[in-house]
Amino acid sequence: MKRSLLDYLGIYAMEYSGSPTELFLLFRQQETYCGVQLISVREVLSLSNQPIHPVPNTPPFVLGLTNLRGEILAVADLGVFIGTEARVDWQELNSRLLIVEAPSPQDGHSSKIRMGLAVSQVEGVVSLKTDRIVSAMDVKEEIAPLLRGLYHYEARLLMILDIEAI
C-alpha cells in the first residue's frame, strides 16, 4: 500500500511524542481560533481572488457558489455559520477560502463532498496531541454538534471543528 506524506508525518509525530498526534490547520474567524484536520483540507485560496456568486433565498451563512476549475462549490461564512462572529471581509488581504472535503452522508466513505469555508486568517499547520482534545461542553448549544472538541494551545483555546458534521 502506497503511503502519503501526511501518513509519514503522522507516524513520525506519534513515534517521537509518545502520544497520538494529528496535523491541524489553524485559522482565525475574527477573534475565535479554530482548527481542522489537515487531511480534510484540499486547498487554501485567497478569498478576494476567488469569485463567489450569491444565491437568492439561502440561509445567511451561505455566501454563494464558486467555480473552482470547473467544479461548482457552495461557500459558507464560518463565523456566521457557527454563530460567533460577523461576516468575513472579502477584501481583507488575509481572508482565506478553505476548500474542505468530507465523506458524503449518502454514500458513506465511498464518495466525497467538497465545500468552501470563508475565514478571516490562516495561522498555519501544527501537530496536536489528540488525547488532549476535550469535550466541547462550555460552548453554545448550537455549536457543540459541529465540534470535535476544544484544545488549549499556546495560551489560546481552539475550537476543533468536525468537518463531517458541518
Image (cartoon, helix red, strand yellow):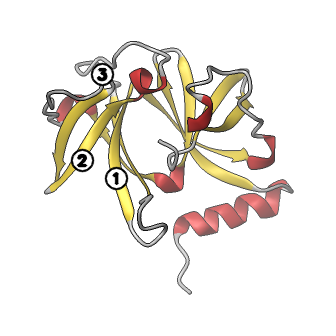
**Identity, as a three-letter code, of the amino acid under mark 3:** Pro
Cα separation, mark 1 vs mark 3, equals 19 Å
Decide: is 145 above or below 138. below
Give the left or right position of residue 138, taking residue 165 as reference: right
Of residue 25 and residue 110, the one placed in the foreground of this image is 110
Q: Is residue 107 above or below residue 16?
A: below
Label 1 SS: strand
Distance in Å between CA atoms under marks 2 and 1: 7 Å
Q: Residues within 10 Å of mark 1 (few under 14, many from 20)?
A: some
Q: Of callouts 2 and 1, which one flags the residue occurring earlier in the amino acid sequence? A: 2
Mark 2 and mark 1 residues within 8 Å of each other at the beta carbon = yes
| Disc 3 packing (10 Å; few <14; some 14–19; many ≥20) | few
Residue annotated with mark 1: 114
Residue at far right of view? 18
- Find residue 60 and name its label: 3
Q: Quadrant of the N terminus?
A: bottom right
> Which sits earlier in the primary sequence, circle 1 or circle 3?
3
Q: Secondary structure at mark 3?
A: loop
Point out residue 94 in the picture as x, y percentages from the top left corner: 35, 24
Numbered disc in front, either 2 or 3? 3
**Can you give x and y, in whole percent of width and height, for residue 112 in the image?**
39, 62
Q: Residue at x 25, y 22 (%)?
A: 90
- Above/below status of 98 relative to 58: below
- Residue 38 vs residue 91: left or right? right
What is the C-alpha distance between the residues marked 2 and 3?
A: 17 Å
Q: Quadrant of residue 16?
A: bottom right
- Amino acid at the residue labelled 1: Arg
**Residue on which the image places disc 2:** 73
